[in-house]
Amino acid sequence: MELDTLITGAQVIDGTGSPRRAADVGIRGGRIATITAPGGLAGATARTTVTATGRILAPGFIDIHTHSDVTLLDNPGGESKVHQGVTTEVTGNCSYSPFPIGAPGPEPMRGLLRSALDTSLPWTWTDLDGWAEVHHQVGISINLAPLVGHSAVRFAAGLADDRRPTDAELAHMQRLIAGSIEQGAFGMSTGLTLPPSSYGQTDELVALASAMTPYPGAFYASHARVWGGNHVGAVEEAAEIGRRAGVPVEYSHIAIIDTRAHGHPEQLTDVIDRALAGGLDLTADVYPYTAAGTGLNQFLPEWAQEGGPEAMLARLRDPATRARIRADSAKGWFRGLPWDFDSLVLSDLFTDRNRHLLGLSLAAAARDRGEDPLDTFLNLIDEEDNGAGIVAHNRTDPDMRAFLAHPAIMVGSDGNAISPDGPHGLPLRPHPRFYGTYPRILGRYVRDLPTVTLEQAVHKMSGMPAARMGMTERGVVAEGLIADLVVFDPATVADQATFTEPHQLPVGIGDVFVNGVAVVANGVHTGARPGTVLRRGMA
Protein backbone atom coordinates (compact mmCIF):
# COMPACT_ATOMS: atom_id res chain seq x y z
CA MET A 1 0.00 0.00 0.00
CA GLU A 2 1.27 3.45 -0.92
CA LEU A 3 0.56 6.22 1.57
CA ASP A 4 1.33 9.91 1.88
CA THR A 5 1.86 9.62 5.64
CA LEU A 6 2.09 6.65 7.99
CA ILE A 7 1.56 7.21 11.72
CA THR A 8 2.75 4.26 13.79
CA GLY A 9 2.48 3.21 17.41
CA ALA A 10 -0.24 5.67 18.39
CA GLN A 11 -2.94 5.36 21.00
CA VAL A 12 -5.97 6.44 18.98
CA ILE A 13 -8.74 8.39 20.73
CA ASP A 14 -11.28 8.63 17.95
CA GLY A 15 -13.41 11.57 19.13
CA THR A 16 -16.56 9.59 19.87
CA GLY A 17 -15.85 9.17 23.57
CA SER A 18 -14.89 5.52 23.10
CA PRO A 19 -11.83 4.14 24.92
CA ARG A 20 -8.45 4.59 23.28
CA ARG A 21 -6.89 1.77 21.26
CA ALA A 22 -3.46 1.09 19.83
CA ALA A 23 -3.32 1.49 16.06
CA ASP A 24 -1.33 2.52 13.00
CA VAL A 25 -2.97 5.06 10.70
CA GLY A 26 -2.32 5.74 7.02
CA ILE A 27 -3.15 8.98 5.20
CA ARG A 28 -3.58 9.21 1.45
CA GLY A 29 -5.12 11.93 -0.70
CA GLY A 30 -6.07 14.04 2.31
CA ARG A 31 -8.09 11.28 3.94
CA ILE A 32 -7.61 8.54 6.49
CA ALA A 33 -6.97 5.63 4.15
CA THR A 34 -6.58 2.87 6.71
CA ILE A 35 -6.50 2.10 10.43
CA THR A 36 -4.93 -1.17 11.49
CA ALA A 37 -3.65 -2.95 14.56
CA PRO A 38 -0.04 -2.04 15.44
CA GLY A 39 2.30 -3.42 12.79
CA GLY A 40 -0.52 -3.99 10.33
CA LEU A 41 0.98 -1.53 7.85
CA ALA A 42 4.50 -2.93 8.01
CA GLY A 43 4.53 -3.51 4.26
CA ALA A 44 3.23 -0.08 3.33
CA THR A 45 5.36 2.63 1.75
CA ALA A 46 4.94 6.24 2.75
CA ARG A 47 6.58 9.54 1.86
CA THR A 48 6.54 10.47 5.56
CA THR A 49 6.43 8.33 8.68
CA VAL A 50 5.52 9.69 12.10
CA THR A 51 6.47 7.50 15.04
CA ALA A 52 3.82 8.15 17.67
CA THR A 53 4.81 5.62 20.32
CA GLY A 54 3.55 6.78 23.72
CA ARG A 55 1.49 9.53 22.15
CA ILE A 56 -2.20 10.10 21.41
CA LEU A 57 -3.59 10.41 17.89
CA ALA A 58 -6.89 12.32 17.94
CA PRO A 59 -9.11 14.22 15.52
CA GLY A 60 -8.02 17.78 14.92
CA PHE A 61 -9.79 20.03 17.38
CA ILE A 62 -12.78 22.03 16.13
CA ASP A 63 -12.96 25.34 17.99
CA ILE A 64 -16.70 26.01 18.12
CA HIS A 65 -16.32 29.62 19.28
CA THR A 66 -13.72 31.93 17.71
CA HIS A 67 -13.32 35.39 16.25
CA SER A 68 -10.81 34.47 13.55
CA ASP A 69 -13.02 35.99 10.86
CA VAL A 70 -10.23 38.02 9.25
CA THR A 71 -7.14 37.45 11.41
CA LEU A 72 -5.81 34.77 9.04
CA LEU A 73 -5.60 37.34 6.26
CA ASP A 74 -2.71 38.93 8.20
CA ASN A 75 -1.60 35.76 10.03
CA PRO A 76 -2.24 32.93 7.52
CA GLY A 77 -0.23 30.43 9.55
CA GLY A 78 -2.67 30.69 12.46
CA GLU A 79 0.13 29.69 14.84
CA SER A 80 -1.73 30.44 18.05
CA LYS A 81 -4.36 27.83 17.17
CA VAL A 82 -2.73 25.21 14.99
CA HIS A 83 0.00 24.63 17.61
CA GLN A 84 -2.83 23.73 20.00
CA GLY A 85 -4.05 21.04 17.61
CA VAL A 86 -6.93 23.15 16.31
CA THR A 87 -7.64 22.40 12.66
CA THR A 88 -10.98 24.22 12.22
CA GLU A 89 -12.08 27.62 13.53
CA VAL A 90 -15.82 28.39 13.77
CA THR A 91 -16.16 32.10 13.02
CA GLY A 92 -18.94 34.69 13.03
CA ASN A 93 -19.71 34.31 16.73
CA CYS A 94 -21.28 36.86 19.10
CA SER A 95 -23.18 38.48 16.19
CA TYR A 96 -19.88 39.54 14.58
CA SER A 97 -19.39 38.24 11.06
CA PRO A 98 -17.67 40.20 8.27
CA PHE A 99 -20.63 39.57 5.99
CA PRO A 100 -23.19 40.34 4.74
CA ILE A 101 -22.17 43.87 3.81
CA GLY A 102 -25.03 46.20 2.91
CA ALA A 103 -25.35 49.81 1.80
CA PRO A 104 -23.49 51.23 4.86
CA GLY A 105 -20.38 49.34 3.73
CA PRO A 106 -17.91 47.41 5.92
CA GLU A 107 -16.94 50.21 8.29
CA PRO A 108 -19.65 49.61 10.93
CA MET A 109 -18.46 46.04 11.46
CA ARG A 110 -14.77 46.93 11.24
CA GLY A 111 -15.23 49.64 13.83
CA LEU A 112 -17.45 47.58 16.12
CA LEU A 113 -14.70 45.23 17.20
CA ARG A 114 -11.64 46.86 15.76
CA SER A 115 -8.97 44.73 17.44
CA ALA A 116 -10.51 41.44 16.28
CA LEU A 117 -12.34 42.16 13.05
CA ASP A 118 -9.80 44.39 11.34
CA THR A 119 -7.07 43.48 8.90
CA SER A 120 -4.52 45.30 6.78
CA LEU A 121 -6.31 44.07 3.65
CA PRO A 122 -9.31 45.95 2.29
CA TRP A 123 -12.74 44.39 2.77
CA THR A 124 -13.61 43.89 -0.89
CA TRP A 125 -16.36 41.32 -0.34
CA THR A 126 -20.07 41.72 0.32
CA ASP A 127 -21.09 38.14 1.13
CA LEU A 128 -19.80 34.81 2.41
CA ASP A 129 -18.67 33.70 -1.04
CA GLY A 130 -16.52 36.79 -1.51
CA TRP A 131 -15.06 36.53 2.00
CA ALA A 132 -14.18 32.88 1.39
CA GLU A 133 -12.54 33.66 -1.95
CA VAL A 134 -10.22 36.24 -0.36
CA HIS A 135 -9.10 33.65 2.20
CA HIS A 136 -8.47 31.11 -0.54
CA GLN A 137 -6.44 33.66 -2.49
CA VAL A 138 -4.26 34.40 0.55
CA GLY A 139 -3.91 30.73 1.53
CA ILE A 140 -4.50 29.68 5.14
CA SER A 141 -3.12 26.93 7.34
CA ILE A 142 -6.38 25.91 9.06
CA ASN A 143 -10.03 25.58 8.10
CA LEU A 144 -12.74 28.17 8.73
CA ALA A 145 -16.41 27.33 9.30
CA PRO A 146 -18.54 30.51 9.30
CA LEU A 147 -21.70 31.59 11.08
CA VAL A 148 -23.63 34.68 10.02
CA GLY A 149 -23.86 37.36 12.71
CA HIS A 150 -26.93 39.26 13.85
CA SER A 151 -25.09 42.58 14.23
CA ALA A 152 -23.73 42.28 10.69
CA VAL A 153 -27.24 41.56 9.40
CA ARG A 154 -28.69 44.52 11.30
CA PHE A 155 -25.99 46.85 9.95
CA ALA A 156 -26.52 45.52 6.41
CA ALA A 157 -30.23 46.25 6.73
CA GLY A 158 -29.52 49.79 7.98
CA LEU A 159 -30.81 48.97 11.46
CA ALA A 160 -28.16 50.25 13.86
CA ASP A 161 -30.65 51.95 16.15
CA ASP A 162 -32.37 50.70 19.30
CA ARG A 163 -35.77 49.95 17.81
CA ARG A 164 -37.85 47.12 16.47
CA PRO A 165 -37.52 46.43 12.74
CA THR A 166 -40.36 47.25 10.41
CA ASP A 167 -41.97 44.31 8.63
CA ALA A 168 -39.94 45.16 5.53
CA GLU A 169 -36.68 45.37 7.50
CA LEU A 170 -37.39 42.06 9.22
CA ALA A 171 -38.08 40.38 5.89
CA HIS A 172 -34.84 41.87 4.51
CA MET A 173 -32.84 40.47 7.44
CA GLN A 174 -34.48 37.06 7.02
CA ARG A 175 -33.40 37.05 3.37
CA LEU A 176 -29.85 38.02 4.34
CA ILE A 177 -29.66 35.16 6.83
CA ALA A 178 -31.16 32.64 4.43
CA GLY A 179 -28.78 33.81 1.71
CA SER A 180 -25.77 33.30 3.97
CA ILE A 181 -27.00 29.83 4.98
CA GLU A 182 -27.45 28.94 1.30
CA GLN A 183 -23.86 30.05 0.66
CA GLY A 184 -22.70 27.67 3.39
CA ALA A 185 -22.98 29.37 6.78
CA PHE A 186 -23.56 26.81 9.50
CA GLY A 187 -25.91 28.97 11.54
CA MET A 188 -26.69 32.39 12.98
CA SER A 189 -25.15 34.04 16.04
CA THR A 190 -26.25 36.82 18.35
CA GLY A 191 -24.43 39.06 20.81
CA LEU A 192 -27.18 40.13 23.14
CA THR A 193 -25.08 42.37 25.37
CA LEU A 194 -23.49 43.95 22.31
CA PRO A 195 -25.25 46.64 20.26
CA PRO A 196 -26.78 46.51 17.76
CA SER A 197 -27.52 42.81 18.33
CA SER A 198 -28.66 43.61 21.88
CA TYR A 199 -31.38 45.84 20.45
CA GLY A 200 -33.09 42.78 19.03
CA GLN A 201 -36.00 41.60 21.15
CA THR A 202 -36.91 37.94 21.56
CA ASP A 203 -39.62 38.05 18.87
CA GLU A 204 -37.15 39.49 16.35
CA LEU A 205 -34.64 36.75 17.12
CA VAL A 206 -37.26 34.03 16.80
CA ALA A 207 -38.27 35.40 13.41
CA LEU A 208 -34.67 35.54 12.22
CA ALA A 209 -33.81 32.09 13.54
CA SER A 210 -36.93 30.78 11.83
CA ALA A 211 -35.36 31.76 8.51
CA MET A 212 -32.97 28.84 9.10
CA THR A 213 -35.70 26.24 9.67
CA PRO A 214 -35.69 24.99 6.05
CA TYR A 215 -31.96 24.19 6.32
CA PRO A 216 -31.33 20.98 8.29
CA GLY A 217 -28.73 21.36 11.02
CA ALA A 218 -28.44 25.15 10.82
CA PHE A 219 -28.32 26.34 14.43
CA TYR A 220 -28.68 29.39 16.64
CA ALA A 221 -25.55 30.38 18.62
CA SER A 222 -26.20 32.87 21.40
CA HIS A 223 -23.90 35.19 23.28
CA ALA A 224 -26.82 35.77 25.60
CA ARG A 225 -28.13 38.67 27.71
CA VAL A 226 -25.88 38.17 30.73
CA TRP A 227 -26.95 41.43 32.34
CA GLY A 228 -26.63 41.85 36.08
CA GLY A 229 -29.00 39.41 37.77
CA ASN A 230 -30.00 37.75 34.48
CA HIS A 231 -27.55 34.83 34.27
CA VAL A 232 -30.39 32.28 34.47
CA GLY A 233 -32.78 34.25 32.29
CA ALA A 234 -30.10 34.46 29.62
CA VAL A 235 -30.05 30.67 29.19
CA GLU A 236 -33.83 30.51 29.35
CA GLU A 237 -34.19 33.04 26.53
CA ALA A 238 -31.76 31.10 24.31
CA ALA A 239 -33.79 27.95 24.88
CA GLU A 240 -37.04 29.78 24.17
CA ILE A 241 -35.73 31.07 20.85
CA GLY A 242 -34.67 27.57 19.82
CA ARG A 243 -38.02 26.06 20.78
CA ARG A 244 -40.12 28.71 19.05
CA ALA A 245 -37.99 28.78 15.90
CA GLY A 246 -37.55 25.02 15.75
CA VAL A 247 -33.75 25.13 15.47
CA PRO A 248 -30.88 23.69 17.57
CA VAL A 249 -29.15 26.01 20.05
CA GLU A 250 -25.52 26.54 21.02
CA TYR A 251 -25.13 28.64 24.20
CA SER A 252 -21.86 30.52 23.84
CA HIS A 253 -19.04 30.69 26.41
CA ILE A 254 -21.20 29.69 29.36
CA ALA A 255 -20.12 31.37 32.60
CA ILE A 256 -21.33 33.29 35.62
CA ILE A 257 -19.85 36.78 35.42
CA ASP A 258 -21.99 38.34 38.16
CA THR A 259 -19.77 37.96 41.21
CA ARG A 260 -22.86 37.98 43.41
CA ALA A 261 -23.96 34.67 41.83
CA HIS A 262 -20.68 32.78 41.84
CA GLY A 263 -20.86 29.24 43.20
CA HIS A 264 -24.17 28.25 41.64
CA PRO A 265 -23.41 26.71 38.21
CA GLU A 266 -26.32 24.31 38.66
CA GLN A 267 -28.71 27.22 38.13
CA LEU A 268 -27.55 27.34 34.50
CA THR A 269 -27.06 23.64 33.88
CA ASP A 270 -30.53 22.92 35.30
CA VAL A 271 -31.98 25.07 32.50
CA ILE A 272 -30.01 23.06 29.95
CA ASP A 273 -31.14 19.77 31.47
CA ARG A 274 -34.79 20.83 31.43
CA ALA A 275 -34.52 21.94 27.81
CA LEU A 276 -32.92 18.65 26.81
CA ALA A 277 -35.60 16.71 28.67
CA GLY A 278 -38.20 18.68 26.74
CA GLY A 279 -36.70 17.65 23.41
CA LEU A 280 -34.67 20.74 22.52
CA ASP A 281 -31.26 20.16 20.94
CA LEU A 282 -29.28 22.47 23.23
CA THR A 283 -25.53 22.46 23.83
CA ALA A 284 -23.05 25.00 25.18
CA ASP A 285 -19.34 25.74 25.13
CA VAL A 286 -16.85 26.88 27.76
CA TYR A 287 -13.22 27.98 27.91
CA PRO A 288 -10.92 26.97 30.80
CA TYR A 289 -10.09 30.38 32.29
CA THR A 290 -11.45 32.62 35.01
CA ALA A 291 -11.32 35.75 32.88
CA ALA A 292 -12.97 37.06 29.73
CA GLY A 293 -11.53 39.21 26.99
CA THR A 294 -13.45 41.94 25.20
CA GLY A 295 -13.47 45.47 23.87
CA LEU A 296 -13.57 48.22 26.44
CA ASN A 297 -16.50 49.79 24.60
CA GLN A 298 -18.75 46.90 25.64
CA PHE A 299 -18.89 48.32 29.16
CA LEU A 300 -20.60 51.51 27.94
CA PRO A 301 -24.35 52.01 28.39
CA GLU A 302 -26.27 50.60 25.42
CA TRP A 303 -27.76 53.93 24.42
CA ALA A 304 -24.27 55.38 24.08
CA GLN A 305 -23.40 52.75 21.46
CA GLU A 306 -26.51 53.27 19.34
CA GLY A 307 -25.86 53.91 15.66
CA GLY A 308 -22.46 52.22 15.53
CA PRO A 309 -18.88 53.07 16.52
CA GLU A 310 -18.64 56.49 14.89
CA ALA A 311 -21.83 57.68 16.53
CA MET A 312 -20.62 56.33 19.86
CA LEU A 313 -17.28 58.15 19.57
CA ALA A 314 -19.07 61.35 18.63
CA ARG A 315 -21.12 61.12 21.82
CA LEU A 316 -17.98 60.57 23.90
CA ARG A 317 -16.42 63.66 22.33
CA ASP A 318 -19.40 65.89 23.08
CA PRO A 319 -18.93 67.27 26.62
CA ALA A 320 -22.60 67.28 27.58
CA THR A 321 -23.30 63.79 26.26
CA ARG A 322 -20.08 62.51 27.77
CA ALA A 323 -21.21 63.74 31.17
CA ARG A 324 -24.42 61.76 30.77
CA ILE A 325 -22.46 58.65 29.72
CA ARG A 326 -20.24 59.02 32.77
CA ALA A 327 -23.20 59.39 35.10
CA ASP A 328 -24.88 56.27 33.71
CA SER A 329 -21.62 54.31 33.72
CA ALA A 330 -21.08 55.15 37.38
CA LYS A 331 -24.13 52.98 38.18
CA GLY A 332 -22.31 49.86 36.94
CA TRP A 333 -21.87 47.95 33.68
CA PHE A 334 -24.08 45.40 31.92
CA ARG A 335 -27.11 46.94 33.60
CA GLY A 336 -25.92 46.90 37.15
CA LEU A 337 -22.82 44.75 37.53
CA PRO A 338 -20.56 46.50 40.05
CA TRP A 339 -17.26 47.95 38.87
CA ASP A 340 -13.99 46.39 40.00
CA PHE A 341 -11.36 48.40 38.17
CA ASP A 342 -8.55 46.26 39.59
CA SER A 343 -9.98 43.23 37.76
CA LEU A 344 -10.02 44.86 34.31
CA VAL A 345 -6.60 44.59 32.66
CA LEU A 346 -5.69 46.45 29.47
CA SER A 347 -4.78 44.10 26.61
CA ASP A 348 -5.11 46.08 23.37
CA LEU A 349 -3.86 49.65 22.97
CA PHE A 350 -2.48 50.90 19.67
CA THR A 351 -1.37 54.50 20.20
CA ASP A 352 2.15 55.41 21.26
CA ARG A 353 0.63 57.61 23.96
CA ASN A 354 -1.02 54.69 25.73
CA ARG A 355 0.98 51.60 24.85
CA HIS A 356 2.94 51.73 28.11
CA LEU A 357 -0.32 50.98 29.90
CA LEU A 358 -0.63 47.49 28.39
CA GLY A 359 -0.86 44.90 31.14
CA LEU A 360 -2.03 47.38 33.76
CA SER A 361 -5.44 47.26 35.37
CA LEU A 362 -7.77 50.16 34.76
CA ALA A 363 -7.19 51.15 38.37
CA ALA A 364 -3.40 51.17 37.88
CA ALA A 365 -3.70 52.98 34.54
CA ALA A 366 -5.84 55.62 36.22
CA ARG A 367 -3.17 56.14 38.86
CA ASP A 368 -0.54 56.44 36.11
CA ARG A 369 -2.63 59.10 34.38
CA GLY A 370 -3.74 60.86 37.56
CA GLU A 371 -7.42 60.26 36.80
CA ASP A 372 -10.48 58.67 38.26
CA PRO A 373 -10.78 55.11 36.84
CA LEU A 374 -14.15 55.94 35.34
CA ASP A 375 -12.56 58.77 33.35
CA THR A 376 -9.69 56.52 32.24
CA PHE A 377 -12.26 54.01 31.01
CA LEU A 378 -13.96 56.64 28.85
CA ASN A 379 -10.76 58.39 27.77
CA LEU A 380 -9.13 55.21 26.48
CA ILE A 381 -12.13 54.32 24.32
CA ASP A 382 -11.91 57.83 22.87
CA GLU A 383 -8.14 58.04 22.47
CA GLU A 384 -7.88 54.57 20.92
CA ASP A 385 -10.72 55.19 18.44
CA ASN A 386 -12.63 52.28 19.95
CA GLY A 387 -9.64 49.91 19.69
CA ALA A 388 -9.02 49.46 23.42
CA GLY A 389 -9.35 45.90 24.69
CA ILE A 390 -9.32 44.37 28.16
CA VAL A 391 -9.12 41.09 30.01
CA ALA A 392 -11.82 40.93 32.69
CA HIS A 393 -11.19 38.65 35.69
CA ASN A 394 -14.78 37.94 36.67
CA ARG A 395 -15.47 34.20 37.08
CA THR A 396 -14.35 31.24 39.20
CA ASP A 397 -12.54 27.99 38.53
CA PRO A 398 -15.08 25.77 40.38
CA ASP A 399 -17.92 27.19 38.26
CA MET A 400 -15.91 26.67 35.07
CA ARG A 401 -15.04 23.07 36.01
CA ALA A 402 -18.70 22.29 36.69
CA PHE A 403 -19.58 23.53 33.21
CA LEU A 404 -16.70 21.62 31.62
CA ALA A 405 -17.85 18.37 33.21
CA HIS A 406 -21.44 18.68 32.02
CA PRO A 407 -22.20 16.22 29.18
CA ALA A 408 -23.92 18.86 27.02
CA ILE A 409 -21.04 21.36 27.19
CA MET A 410 -18.07 21.29 24.81
CA VAL A 411 -14.90 23.37 24.54
CA GLY A 412 -14.61 26.68 22.69
CA SER A 413 -11.81 29.21 23.10
CA ASP A 414 -13.44 32.56 22.25
CA GLY A 415 -9.95 33.32 20.92
CA ASN A 416 -8.36 34.12 17.58
CA ALA A 417 -5.88 32.50 15.22
CA ILE A 418 -2.94 34.90 15.25
CA SER A 419 0.86 34.81 15.06
CA PRO A 420 3.25 35.96 17.79
CA ASP A 421 5.09 38.19 15.30
CA GLY A 422 1.99 39.38 13.43
CA PRO A 423 -0.01 42.58 13.85
CA HIS A 424 -1.86 41.07 16.82
CA GLY A 425 1.39 39.96 18.46
CA LEU A 426 3.66 41.86 20.80
CA PRO A 427 3.33 44.30 22.44
CA LEU A 428 -0.41 43.54 22.57
CA ARG A 429 -1.46 41.24 25.38
CA PRO A 430 -4.50 39.24 24.28
CA HIS A 431 -6.22 36.69 26.46
CA PRO A 432 -4.06 33.53 26.86
CA ARG A 433 -6.97 31.48 25.49
CA PHE A 434 -5.71 32.48 22.03
CA TYR A 435 -2.73 30.17 22.60
CA GLY A 436 -3.62 27.86 25.46
CA THR A 437 -7.24 26.66 25.59
CA TYR A 438 -6.87 23.11 24.27
CA PRO A 439 -3.55 22.11 25.88
CA ARG A 440 -4.83 23.67 29.12
CA ILE A 441 -7.79 21.29 29.07
CA LEU A 442 -5.56 18.30 28.26
CA GLY A 443 -2.92 19.18 30.82
CA ARG A 444 -4.57 20.97 33.71
CA TYR A 445 -8.13 19.62 33.62
CA VAL A 446 -7.43 16.07 32.47
CA ARG A 447 -4.06 15.25 33.98
CA ASP A 448 -3.38 17.66 36.84
CA LEU A 449 -6.82 18.54 38.22
CA PRO A 450 -8.94 15.71 36.83
CA THR A 451 -12.28 17.12 35.74
CA VAL A 452 -12.94 15.06 32.61
CA THR A 453 -11.23 11.96 31.23
CA LEU A 454 -8.95 12.21 28.23
CA GLU A 455 -11.53 10.50 26.05
CA GLN A 456 -14.23 12.91 27.24
CA ALA A 457 -11.99 15.91 26.66
CA VAL A 458 -11.14 14.86 23.10
CA HIS A 459 -14.83 14.25 22.40
CA LYS A 460 -15.69 17.76 23.67
CA MET A 461 -13.01 19.16 21.33
CA SER A 462 -13.73 17.16 18.19
CA GLY A 463 -16.65 14.75 17.77
CA MET A 464 -19.08 16.86 19.80
CA PRO A 465 -18.49 20.17 17.96
CA ALA A 466 -18.47 18.26 14.66
CA ALA A 467 -21.93 16.92 15.50
CA ARG A 468 -23.20 20.39 16.42
CA MET A 469 -21.85 21.74 13.11
CA GLY A 470 -23.35 18.88 11.14
CA MET A 471 -19.89 17.87 9.93
CA THR A 472 -19.84 14.28 8.69
CA GLU A 473 -16.32 14.29 7.23
CA ARG A 474 -14.36 15.54 10.26
CA GLY A 475 -14.19 15.30 14.03
CA VAL A 476 -13.69 11.54 14.23
CA VAL A 477 -10.76 9.24 13.43
CA ALA A 478 -12.30 6.75 11.01
CA GLU A 479 -11.39 5.32 7.64
CA GLY A 480 -12.51 7.46 4.73
CA LEU A 481 -12.83 10.70 6.70
CA ILE A 482 -10.73 13.79 6.08
CA ALA A 483 -7.37 13.63 7.84
CA ASP A 484 -7.60 16.58 10.23
CA LEU A 485 -5.48 15.03 13.00
CA VAL A 486 -3.35 15.92 16.02
CA VAL A 487 -0.63 13.89 17.75
CA PHE A 488 0.20 14.86 21.35
CA ASP A 489 1.94 13.52 24.44
CA PRO A 490 -0.60 13.18 27.29
CA ALA A 491 2.20 13.23 29.87
CA THR A 492 3.66 16.58 28.83
CA VAL A 493 0.99 18.53 26.97
CA ALA A 494 0.47 21.90 28.65
CA ASP A 495 -0.32 25.51 27.94
CA GLN A 496 2.44 28.09 28.36
CA ALA A 497 0.50 31.29 27.68
CA THR A 498 -0.19 33.50 30.68
CA PHE A 499 -2.05 36.75 31.19
CA THR A 500 1.25 38.64 31.42
CA GLU A 501 2.99 36.71 28.61
CA PRO A 502 0.23 35.40 26.35
CA HIS A 503 2.22 34.88 23.14
CA GLN A 504 3.63 31.50 24.25
CA LEU A 505 3.10 28.33 22.24
CA PRO A 506 2.12 25.18 24.16
CA VAL A 507 4.28 22.11 24.66
CA GLY A 508 3.56 18.45 24.06
CA ILE A 509 1.74 18.81 20.73
CA GLY A 510 4.10 17.49 18.08
CA ASP A 511 2.20 16.97 14.83
CA VAL A 512 -0.92 18.50 13.29
CA PHE A 513 -2.46 17.59 9.94
CA VAL A 514 -5.01 19.74 8.10
CA ASN A 515 -6.74 18.08 5.16
CA GLY A 516 -4.01 15.43 5.25
CA VAL A 517 -1.13 17.91 5.06
CA ALA A 518 1.36 18.34 7.90
CA VAL A 519 1.08 21.92 9.18
CA VAL A 520 3.03 21.19 12.37
CA ALA A 521 5.76 18.55 12.28
CA ASN A 522 7.88 17.74 15.34
CA GLY A 523 6.52 20.88 16.98
CA VAL A 524 7.51 23.22 14.13
CA HIS A 525 5.13 24.98 11.75
CA THR A 526 5.85 23.74 8.22
CA GLY A 527 4.51 26.80 6.46
CA ALA A 528 1.91 24.73 4.63
CA ARG A 529 -1.43 26.38 3.89
CA PRO A 530 -3.91 23.58 3.15
CA GLY A 531 -6.83 25.16 4.99
CA THR A 532 -10.12 25.98 3.35
CA VAL A 533 -13.45 27.64 4.09
CA LEU A 534 -15.91 24.87 4.92
CA ARG A 535 -19.59 25.03 4.00
CA ARG A 536 -22.66 23.63 5.73
CA GLY A 537 -23.57 20.23 4.31
CA MET A 538 -20.17 19.85 2.65
CA ALA A 539 -17.87 19.36 5.64
Image (cartoon, rainbow, N blue to C red):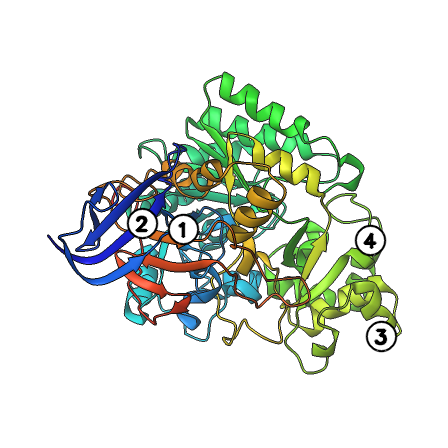
Classed neighbour count for the residue bearing mark 2: other residues with Cα under 10 Å, few (<14), some (14–19), many (≥20): many
Rendered view: 284 above or below 245: below
Q: Would residue 455 appear left or right of 401 to someone viewing this image?
A: left
Residue 379 or 419: which is nearer the viewer? 419
Q: Which residue is mark 2?
A: 9
- Can you tell which quarter of the image residue 262 is in? top right
For the residues marked 3 and 4, what is the alpha-carbon distance in whole angstroms?
17 Å
Rendered view: 373 above or below 478: below
Q: Is residue 88 visible?
A: no
Q: Mark 2: which amino acid?
A: Gly
Q: Which residue is mark 1?
A: 55
Query: Residue 353: percent from the left, percent from the top?
Result: 72, 82
Q: Which residue is mark 3?
A: 368
Mark whose residue sits in front, 1 or 3: 1
Q: Mark 3: which amino acid?
A: Asp
Q: Which residue is mark 4?
A: 340
For the residues marked 1 and 2, what is the alpha-carbon distance in whole angstroms?
8 Å
Mark 1 or mark 3, which has the lower sequence index?
1
